[in-house]
Image: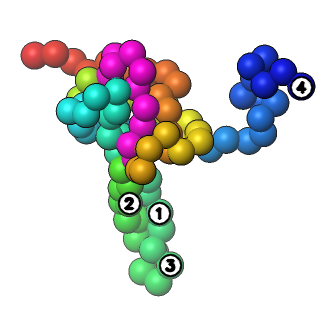
Amino acid sequence: MAAENTTAAERGHRKTRIGVVVSDKMSKTVTVEVTRRVKHPRYKKYVTKRKRYHAHDEAEACAVGDKVRIIETRPLSKTKRWRIIETIEKAQVL
């Protein structure tokens, strides 16, 4: 099998998330904050949960405030297990 000719669909299901870039201070790495709303099991109120992921940004094209889609990948460093696959919305520059 030729490993270089495989597509994402052939590699199996990979998790994807949509979030906002909150830091771009590292080289080729951005921090993406993913927000989700879950219902509290006892009080039935909606609670906002946030999780931050380190994602690989090879082109260094993302800036703080950009809305991006990230995909799960092999470990790239100690904390980096996600890659940026597309920028959904660029941040407005004032």
Q: Are marks 2 and 1 in contact (CB under 8 Å)?
A: yes
Where disc 4 sits, the SS reads loop
- Give the CA separation, mark 4 to mark 2: 42 Å
Image-based side of 51 in relation to 83, left or right: left
Viewer-closest of 40 and 89: 89
Residue on which the image places disc 3:
41
Q: Point out residue 76 in the picture as x, y percentages from the top left corner.
A: 49, 40
- Kindly identify the amino acid type of the residue bearing the numbered disc 1: Val
Q: Specify start and end residues of the magenta stretch as a single range.
A: 53-62
The span from disc 1 to disc 4 (Cα, nearest Å) is 43 Å
Residue depth check, mark 2 versus mark 3: number of the one nearer the observer: 2
Q: Amino acid at mark 2?
A: Lys
Q: Nearer the viewer, residue 29 or 3?
A: 3
The residue carrying pointer 3 sits among few (fewer than 14), some (14 to 19) or many (20 or more) residues within 10 Å by Cα, namely few
The amino acid type of the residue labelled 4 equals Met
Spatial separation of the CA atoms under disc 2 and disc 1: 7 Å
Quadrant (top left, top right, bottom left, bottom right) of the N terminus: top right
- Kindly report the distance in space between the C-alpha atoms of the residues bearing marks 3 and 1: 9 Å
Disc number for residue 38: 1
The residue under label 3 is which amino acid type? Pro
Image point 42% across, 80% down: which residue?
43
Q: Do labels 4 and 3 touch, CB within 8 Å?
A: no
Residue 81 in the figure: left or right of residue 21: right
Q: Residue at x 42, y 37 (%)?
A: 55
Residue 16 is a magenta residue: no
Name the residue tied to disc 2: 49
- Structural distance between the alpha carbons of marks 2 and 3: 14 Å
Q: Residues within 10 Å of mark 2 (few under 14, many from 20)?
A: few
**Kind of element beneath mark 2:** strand
